[in-house]
Image (tube, grey):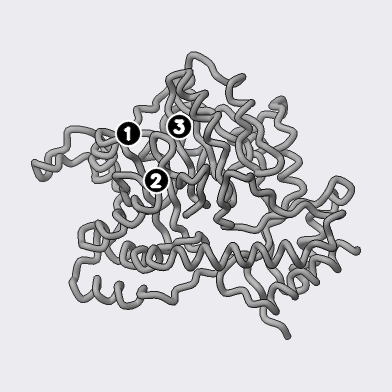
Amino acid sequence: MLAKISVAVPKLSGAEKQYVNEALDSTWISSRGPFIERFETAVAEMAGTRHAIACNNGTTSLHLALAAMGLGPGDEVIMPALTYIATANCVRYCGATPVLVDNDPRTFNIDPTAIEAAMTPRTKGIMVVHLYGHAADMGPIMECADRHGVWVLEDAAEAHGARYRDRPVGGIGRCGSFSFFGNKIVTTGEGGAVTTNDDELAARMRLLRSQGMDTKRRYWHPVVGYNYRMTNVTAAIGVAQMERLPEALEKRRAIAAAYTERLESLAERIERPYVAGDCSHAYWMYTIQLRHSFASSRDDVMAKMEMDGIETRPVFYPVNHMPPYFDDKLNVPNAVLCSKRGINLPTHELLSDSDLDRICESLTQALAG
């Protein structure tokens, strides 16, 4: 019987064990130790920023950024309806309101033309999501933000190493947030980080991350903070992962190219990933969409592939379809279509050519009925 092909598998072939053992041998296993600073430096270099503040997961990194920017009750944040639920939840944690808008059907990312219409006097910021590894169209988004005097937070959880107009994501808005969950391009098991060029904001985030303790007066807490710190052991894994990020991106792009070539014969039935000419896709996931005439069979296709031992993932549900945010009057047709038609195929560095052949053959058979 053929082994199951998982949708995501971490590759831990670098110095992960060596660095973790170094952290253990040093006895610095908690939220202090040299690997934390090394990891923050590497993440800042990836994003092209002066600062990176490591956190214990991607959700807390988003919340930390929002809290540090002063988001609170009565405020609004414009964001895409098509995203992982954490994007909206973190706004709610601050007592603010997520304002959901539609996405570009090709890239899955927030539609810049929809942002302007959603602006109100209560809008404090725009949260973009570089979904599945493709950068959002940051040029017009930043122009809109500048016109209205609001900030931009990049949710780059899935886009390590992606670029927009030759600029790395996470370094274009006021700040960026990354996740290092076990299925991400760079993983620490659980982990996150916020990147920024704003010195004052970075200092504020470091204060809030560590229970609000004054950096110059131990156990003195001038503000209410959080325990969002990353451990030295976790950071040790991250340092090793960051060392081989260029290799990881090269492999993922090679896998994407191989998929695109193998799926040419299905062009009338599926849409392969679109890549804007001014972007460099990181390919956290290789995401296809069934064309309209096949859209109703998306779940059947996934079920058939599962029977062949191939794990896939559906594209995220629109946030306004979730009970905490339910709004059946919100008009986001592209988000609905992408959600209904989208499938994430297995995308990770351990895939072999024979795995790709098997996945594409399974997809072909599933679409044939």
Circle 1 sits in a helix, a strand or a loop, which is it?
A: helix
Compared to 164, does 42 lie above or below?
Answer: below
Badge 1 vs badge 2, beta-carbon distance below 8 Å:
no
Q: Position of residue 358 (x, y in %)?
A: 75, 75
Q: In the displayed structure, does residue 108 sit left or right of residue 262?
A: left
Nearer the observer, disc 2 or disc 3? 3
Few, some or many residues within 10 Å of mark 3 (<14, 14–19, 20+): many
Q: Earlier in the sequence, mark 1 or mark 2?
A: 2
Q: Earlier in the sequence, mark 1 or mark 3?
A: 1
- Give the label on residue 231, or none: none
Work out how far the residue at label 1 is from the one at label 3, CA to CA, in angstroms: 13 Å
Nearer the observer, disc 1 or disc 2? 1
From the image, which quarter does the N terminus lie in? bottom right
Looking at the rendered structure, the kind of residue marked 3 is: Val
- Give the label on residue 152, or none: 3
Circle 2 sits in a helix, a strand or a loop, which is it?
A: helix
Q: Which residue is mark 1?
A: 68
Q: Which residue is mark 2?
A: 60
Few, some or many residues within 10 Å of mark 2 (<14, 14–19, 20+): many
Residue at x-position 31% and y-position 59%: 39
